[in-house]
Image: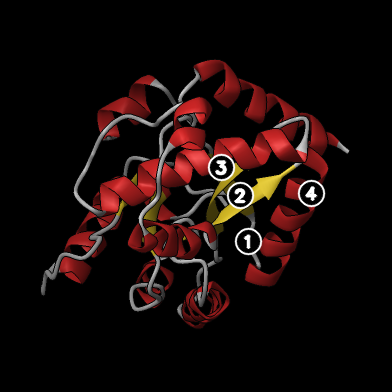
């Protein structure tokens, strides 16, 4: 990462996370990483120490980056509830340690020109996610495939659960929900991701949302 930062100054950040893994040395490893990379990056009030970002979702790891001066990325796409408490705990730890907090909220969205198109794309994305949960790690299906699919009761229940972490609708609707989320979480930035079977649908979603966010 230090080499990449030297080749591409001010363009490379480092993101780390542990997912569900249990590592008693995790905090020490992150602290070492921040210390090493901080030496290769010029200090900046606009970036966290070492340009290191720690991803969290459950909230237990949120204070750690605050004590180190690193940034915190909350995975709303992983767990859509409890994020406000996690980001607040991060900011409190950062301020108490004499650091400037840097908070990012990572959100998954689906948008299209019409609500109906957006819902169809979301249905396909949820089918992919649910089938992956049940052990079928295949490609994202098309909207036509998703429309024909016969959902089991268990799959439909899981889709309802997964849909809570997905912002869906027209660009203006998605924009309003994203800005509201950023406000309640005290996020400095939003990291946005969308998935679709057709690359053109994915690209169009980013274009539509970018235009909506310009206002």
Residue 107 in the figure: left or right of residue 17: right
Pointer 2 with pointer 1, Cβ within 8 A = yes
Mark in the foreground, 2 or 3: 3
Residue ID at (61%, 49%): 190
Q: Are marks 1 and 3 in contact (CB under 8 Å)?
A: no
> Residue 73 placed where, x, y %?
46, 58
- Vertically, is 97 above or below 206? below
Q: Does residue 150 appear in the picture of this structure?
A: yes
Q: Vertically, is 90 above or below 196?
A: below
In this view, the residue farthest toward the right is: 215
Q: Give me the C-alpha separation between circle 2 and circle 3.
A: 20 Å
- Decide which of tag 3 and tag 4 comes sooner along the chain: 3
* Residue 112 picture quarter: top right
Q: Residues within 10 Å of mark 2 (few under 14, many from 20)?
A: some
Residue highlighted by disc 2: 190
**Alpha carbons under labels 1 and 4: distance apart:** 19 Å
The residue that appears at 57% across and 35% down in the rendered structure is 121
Residue 30 shown left or right of residue 115 in the figure: left
Identify the image quadrant of residue 180.
bottom right
Q: Position of residue 62 (x, y in %)?
A: 40, 73
Q: Nearer the viewer, mark 1 or mark 4?
A: 4
Task: Give percent across and percent down for residue 183.
Answer: 72, 65
Of marks 2 and 3, which one's residue comes earlier in the chain?
Answer: 3
Answer with mark 1 or mark 3, whichever residue precedes in sequence: 3
- Residue depicted at x 69% and y 71%: 184
Q: Nearer the viewer, mark 3 or mark 4?
A: 3
Name the element at disc 3. Answer: helix
Mark 1 lies on residue: 187
Q: Is 204 left, or right, of 154 in this rendering?
A: right
Identify the mark at residue 173; answer none if there is no mark: 4
* Dot 2 or dot 4, earlier in sequence: 4
Label 1: element kind = loop
């Amino acid at each position: 990462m230090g080499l990449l930062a030297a080749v591409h100054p001010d363009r490379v950040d480092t993101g780390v996370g542990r997912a569900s893994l249990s590592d008693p040395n995790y905090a020490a490893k992150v602290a070492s990483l921040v210390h090493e990379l901080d030496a290769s990056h010029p200090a900046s009030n606009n970036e966290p120490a070492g340009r290191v970002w720690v991803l969290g979702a459950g909230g237990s790891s949120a204070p750690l980056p605050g004590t180190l001066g690193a940034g915190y990325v909350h995975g709303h796409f992983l767990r859509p509830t409890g994020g406000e408490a996690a980001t607040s705990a991060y900011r409190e730890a950062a301020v108490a340690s004499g650091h400037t907090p840097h908070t990012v909220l990572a959100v998954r969205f689906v948008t299209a020109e019409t609500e109906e198109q957006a819902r169809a794309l979301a249905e396909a994305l949820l089918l992919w996610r649910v089938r992956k949960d049940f052990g079928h790690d295949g490609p994202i299906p098309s909207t036509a495939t998703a429309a024909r699919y016969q959902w089991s009761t268990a799959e439909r229940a899981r889709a309802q659960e997964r849909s809570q972490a997905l912002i869906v609708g027209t660009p203006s609707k998605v924009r309003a929900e994203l800005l509201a989320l950023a406000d309640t979480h005290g996020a400095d930035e939003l990291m946005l991701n969308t998935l679709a079977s057709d690359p053109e649908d994915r690209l169009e979603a980013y274009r539509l949302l970018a235009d909506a966010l310009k206002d």
